[in-house]
Every structure is written in structure tokens, then in C-alpha cells.
């Protein structure tokens, strides 16, 4: 039978032995930049989903689809290391129309920059490059939506 005073050092040694394992569980995966890019894309989607005029909404819907495709390619690249993902990020609902467009573009540019880092997994390069194309296409649709919104405003519609 173990005495209580002998049990304490044994328990402490066991806890310290588990410490590296628990610390590793909270560390980001091999490619935390991909996780950031994915989160930024999801946030951009939520912001872009605000109500606009039909012609603007059509462009934003196309941008939303491209963001979904980019997220899918990032997921396919297998870099997420099974981390808990934030698919419903907090979005500032007080953004005005112009600020919403600025924020969406900022998030898209940030996500593109995040995945631009050197890829050490050759099989993931193709998926990363597809994600680039989808992000670029989403940026193009957001720019078109902003242009449509400006034209509508200038014409008084």
C-alpha cells in the first residue's frame, strides 16, 4: 500500500509527464496559415451575404460560391490537421454598405496572402493553386458587385 506522502510525488511526476501531450493538442497544425485563410474566407462569406439589390446580390452570390470552392480546395489540401474550425465567425452587423465591401475585400486579400506561403507538400500545391483561382474569382465578383452598387446609386435606383 502506498503512503500518502509517497503518492504526491508520483502524482506530480505523472502530471508533468502528460504536460507535453496536452500542450501539443493546443498547438496549431502544420499549416496554421491555411486555417487563418479558411477562417477569413468564411468571415468574408458571412459579411457578403447581407441583403442588396438583385443585381448586386447576383454578383455577391457568385463571389460566395467561389469562396466556398476555395474553402473546399483548402480542405482537400489536407492541411487542417483535424482542428476545431470556426465556421460561423463573429461578423460586425453594423458595417455600412461600402464598409461591408471593403471588409470582404480585405478578408479575401488576407486569405490569399495566408495561403501564399511556401508549400512543403507537393500534392497540396495543385489544390492551393485552385484555391488561389477561386479567391481571385471571388474578388472579381465582389468588385463587380461594388461597381453595380455604385451605378445603381448614381442612377438613383
Image (cartoon, rainbow, N blue to C red):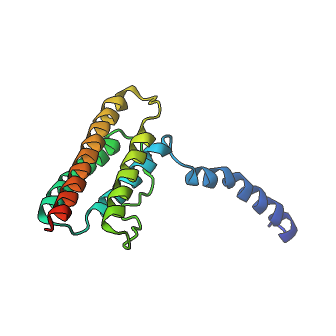
Q: Would you place residue 3 above or below residue 119 in this image?
A: below
Q: Would you place residue 114 above or below residue 149 in this image?
A: above
**Residue 33 picture location, percent across and down:** 47, 44
Outermost top residue: 122
In the image shown, does 38 or 109 lie closer to the viewer?
109
**Residue 127 picture location, percent across and down:** 31, 35
Outermost bottom residue: 94
Q: In which image quadrant can residue 19 be found? A: bottom right
Which residue lies at the image location 20% right of the left edge and 67% below the top edge?
52
**Residue 80 picture location, percent across and down:** 42, 46
Which quarter of the rendering shows the N terminus?
bottom right
Left or right, 128 with respect to 68, comes to right
Which residue lies at the image location 37% right of the left edge and 40% below the top edge?
78
Residue 89 in sight here: yes
Left or right, 121 with respect to 26, comes to left
In the image shown, does 6 or 76 lie closer to the viewer?
76
**Residue 70 picture location, percent across and down:** 29, 45
Which residue lies at the image location 21% right of the left edge and 55% below the top edge?
145
Counting labels gives 0
Left or right, 24 with respect to 32, comes to right
In the image shown, does 112 or 157 lie closer to the viewer?
157
Amino acid at each position: 500500500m502506498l503512503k500518502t506522502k509517497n503518492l504526491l510525488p508520483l502524482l506530480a511526476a505523472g502530471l508533468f509527464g502528460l504536460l507535453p501531450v496536452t500542450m501539443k493538442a493546443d498547438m496549431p497544425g502544420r499549416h496554421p496559415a491555411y486555417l487563418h485563410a479558411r477562417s477569413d474566407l468564411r468571415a468574408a462569406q458571412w459579411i457578403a451575404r447581407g441583403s442588396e439589390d438583385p443585381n448586386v446580390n447576383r454578383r455577391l452570390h457568385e463571389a460566395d460560391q467561389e469562396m466556398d470552392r476555395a474553402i473546399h480546395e483548402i480542405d482537400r489540401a489536407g492541411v487542417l490537421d483535424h482542428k476545431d474550425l470556426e465556421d460561423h465567425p463573429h461578423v460586425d452587423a453594423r458595417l455600412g454598405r461600402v464598409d461591408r465591401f471593403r471588409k470582404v475585400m480585405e478578408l479575401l486579400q488576407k486569405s490569399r496572402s495566408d495561403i501564399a506561403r511556401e508549400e512543403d507538400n507537393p500534392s497540396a500545391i495543385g489544390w492551393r493553386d485552385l484555391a488561389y483561382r477561386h479567391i481571385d474569382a471571388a474578388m472579381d465578383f465582389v468588385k463587380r458587385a461594388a461597381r453595380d452598387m455604385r451605378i445603381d446609386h448614381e442612377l438613383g435606383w
